[in-house]
Amino acid sequence: MKLYRLLARAFPPAFRRRYEEELAETAAELLQSEQSRGPWRRLRVWVGLSVDAVARGLAERRAERVATAQPRPRLGRSIASECRHAVRALAGRPIFSVTIVGLLAITMGANTAVFSVIDAALLRPLPYANPERLVLLWESYAAMHLTTMPWSDLDYLDVRAATSLESAAIFRPRRVVLTGHGDAVSLRASIVEGGLFGVLGVSAGQGRVFNEDDTRGPHHDVALLSHASWQTRFGADPAIVGRSISIDYRPVTVIGVLPPGFSFPPPVTYNGQMIAVEPEIYLPYELKTEPDERGSHNAFVIARLKPGVPVQAAQAEVAAIGERVARQYPETNTDMHMSATSLHAQSVVSIRTTLFVLLAAVGGVLLIACASIANLILARGSGRGREIALRASLGASRASLVRQLLFESAMLGVAGTALGFLVAQWISTGLVALNPIELPAMFQSAIDWRVLGFTAALTVAAVFTFGLIPALQGSRTDLRLMLHSGARTSGLPADRRTKAALAVVQVALALMLLVGSGLALRSLARLWNLDPGFRPEHAAALRITLPPTRYDSESSQRAFEGRLRLRLRQVPGVSRVSTSTLLPFATQIQHTGDYMVVGLPPRKVGDYLIATYQSTSPEYPASLSLRILEGRGFTDTDAAGAPLVALVSESLALRHWPAGHASGHQLRLGDPDDPPRTVIGVVSDVRMEGFASRFAPSIYLPISQLPLADFWLIVTSPRPADQLSADVRAAIREIDPGLPVGAMRALVDVMGDTIKTPRFATIILSAFAGTALLIAAIGLYGVLTFDALERRRELGVRVALGATPASIRRLLVGRGVRIVAAGVMLGAVGALASTRLLAGVFVEVPHADAVAFAAATALLAVTTLVATWLPARRATRTDPIDALRTQ
Amino acid sequence: MELTPTTCQILLALADRDLHGYGIMADVLERTDGRLRLWPGILYGSLKRLSDTGLVEEVDPPRDAPRDRMSRRFYRLTAAGRKALGREMARLARDVQTARARKITVRD
């Protein structure tokens, strides 16, 4: 019957007073009498009761209005006039209104933009069917510190038989050359097994996707285009399906175009770095099943779990298969493990922490802003006590006072939300344009309306809640008292305590953000100051990939490399030209393998010596300012037919020989059949994979003795990289006009890329911390200013009774200091607790770093004390007589 | 006050005995073979107008009524109500006669 009583509220109060009991009883009896006739009947009765209550309730209300002959208030007109009134009231205090609208807009905008990105990256499922059942399979090799390592085709064929997997497919990113559409261009390609699209549960946008037959057998001259490349490279040609295009100088037939938004592989974290391939073309994968291919690990594997099989079960089975394969093929697979991880976890693991830090920072600013808005409105509200009392005594009802304040709050909320939407759009456009953490296109997002709605609801709720307080207070307090002594009405102790508490919260949150950004800055500085082992100044690099169709032999690759270096020396301003198969700090798959030292006893199976191999030209150490610590570097005489030689890095040399005694020893790479290579010198150590990586033991080989189709061209010149780029391109075109050439990049920029994520986090955190500090300082200033104003009369009396300006200042500053001290203590505890979360983001600094804490506290203390001092000074400048008289 | 079919039915229900709200609803429902159900809102809205114009009056429950619900009010037709109902019935009777005279078959 509670429900019916709720319905009965449709009737006007007078009617309810007279008939509510009877209405309810009658309805109850009616329901009782229909009890036995089933639930549908009861439902019909309820529908009838509802319609009746609402229709008759409205009719009774109308009848009542007619009876009492009250003019019906015209809702439309009254809203318009209330709005006008509210706007006038707000315009009368522009600083207050603009501050609140600004706070609302900034908070909403920042929160919405950042949360939209987080939502897209972390919460939205990947664009494949049932993505929660997709797993990535990995091999790993503890001896090489390789936790995620590519698969060999034969190992893959063993693992795909796992019973917990419904299906699996192997794939590999590669670059291919597209010719016949203007200049030769290099395309990002995904080489995929035919079954892949079945595993993903994705079908073509046009034409068809690969099937198993496309990759079986010798004829696989077919290709699929991504939707984006179909549009940009092929002008959205409607007749593309069936057309022949030239890939790696061979004709292939386009059999389909993938749906928009589809991309495979999705961005994944590989050895700690986010790698997003976003292929433009998909080509069939040819499995290599000759027995000697088990040791060559080149490809990645995705699999779909059978329905209901948890990842852990698949992981256990895959690991067991790995152990079985290792026992079966000890030469290649000892110590090799196999594992499975969920695709989604793998795809965002490297940016997750950064995004959560951002979210925390935004949340902090959101809270500070809410506290600040609350404080401003409270302060203003208590200032309006008199106005409200006056209006009330002139006959304004409590309802109309509340309505007036509601409209003012609503005006602020509407303006703030509208502006907040613009700010959100602006920030998210900026985030996408700068794309500071290399967020893949798949994760980029437009503004999320739900998020904007949520943030708007939160902040506007703060406006409304605190906006109404004066009206409620005003109607509670004795009006006569308020009118007679405006001084006392506003300074209600509870009100002042609330304001002080809000200020304390703001100070505490600001300190937490400051500590966070301090840690970020310290970490970044330390990272950047770590010695990478080389000097990047004046060096620029360019990746060259020789298409295998035309450079299929070592001799052709060697010839190109030699001509390239010769030709580039003639480019004006170039001081050194070198080539290398690896470039420090560049995103690439490291060439890592095992080696043997000739003369040392053979090691037992599985106990390998591991090093990074790198083929370089003679001038490579000089271009990067590496030091030759012992012996000599390569020269042009270390050519193809000459005795085989090698350089080793310092850390590798010290592994086997005392310092200064490496030269003359011999190494073999990989298997025992490799010819011995004589160590001719030792080179200083280099960090290969970014500032945070270790010095990698390395073996350098002359590029003419072991050429590769894929290498870096490194040019040192005082000219900037972008100027050099055109000349270098022209020179390369002269040698081979069909070769796609990318842009030349300064090595400093390549290094900068590796700290993009921490740098971005630092900039954002600092910006947020600065905003927070500013808001908190303004908040504190506001509280103390209003405090001083409210106590003007009291201060005037004190001065009249002989208090000195200094003692008045002490009184006011003391209050500010107490607020700051409480805030700092609260904030320090909060910071200690929350920076633990940052441990993964900021390397090289402890999360309780004393310098960061001290600097943050000092900055906060200075700023807030200024905010405290100013109102105190102003208060003591007022003439006490004035102060007494104004009341 | 002008009598509507609804108020007419309420007055009819009260013609020979005092009833409470649900009693009126049940009586009307029965006499109209379930075609007219007076939902609580319309019932009490009508009773209010009938009371306000003095056609019905609120009375205490009769002695023999069940004592389970003490709060319940009964409604009784006033003399004015009886007169108004009589006039309305006479009007309806005249209309029925006119209809018959003009060859309208009066049936259910």
Image (spheres, coloured by chain):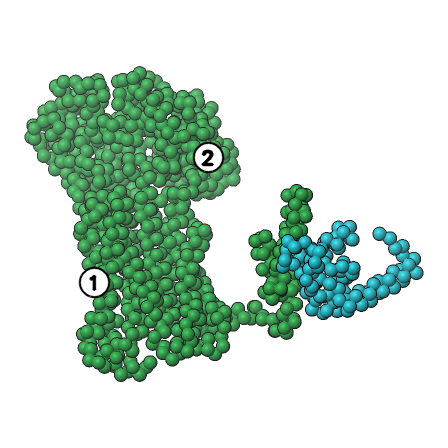
Are the residues tagged 2 and 1 within 8 Å (C-beta)? no
Q: Position of residue A7 (x, y in %)?
A: 59, 56
Asked which quadrant contains residue A884, the reply is bottom left
Asked which quadrant contains residue A405, the reply is bottom left
Q: Position of residue A151 (x, y in %)?
A: 33, 26
Residue visible at 82% across and 65% down in the picture: B86
Instruction: Please indicate whether residue A683 sits to the left or right of residue A145 in the image.
Output: left
Q: Position of residue B52 (x, y in %)?
A: 69, 69
Q: First in sequence: mark 2 or mark 1?
A: 2
Q: Chain of mark 2?
A: A
Label the cyan chain with its letter. B
Label the green chain with its letter. A
Q: Which residue is mark 1?
A: A862
Residue visible at 45% across and 41% down in the picture: A261
Residue visible at 46% across and 75% down in the picture: A392
- Foreground disc of the pair 2, 1: 1
* Secondary element type, mark 1: helix
Residue visible at 20% across and 45% down in the picture: A846
Compared with A384, A137 (above or below) is above
Q: Residues within 10 Å of mark 2 (few under 14, many from 20)?
A: few
Q: Chain of mark 1?
A: A
Residue A340 in view (yes/no): yes
Q: How many marks?
A: 2
The amino acid pointed to by label 2 is Asn
Instruction: Please indicate whether residue A592 sits to the left or right of residue B16 in the image.
Output: left
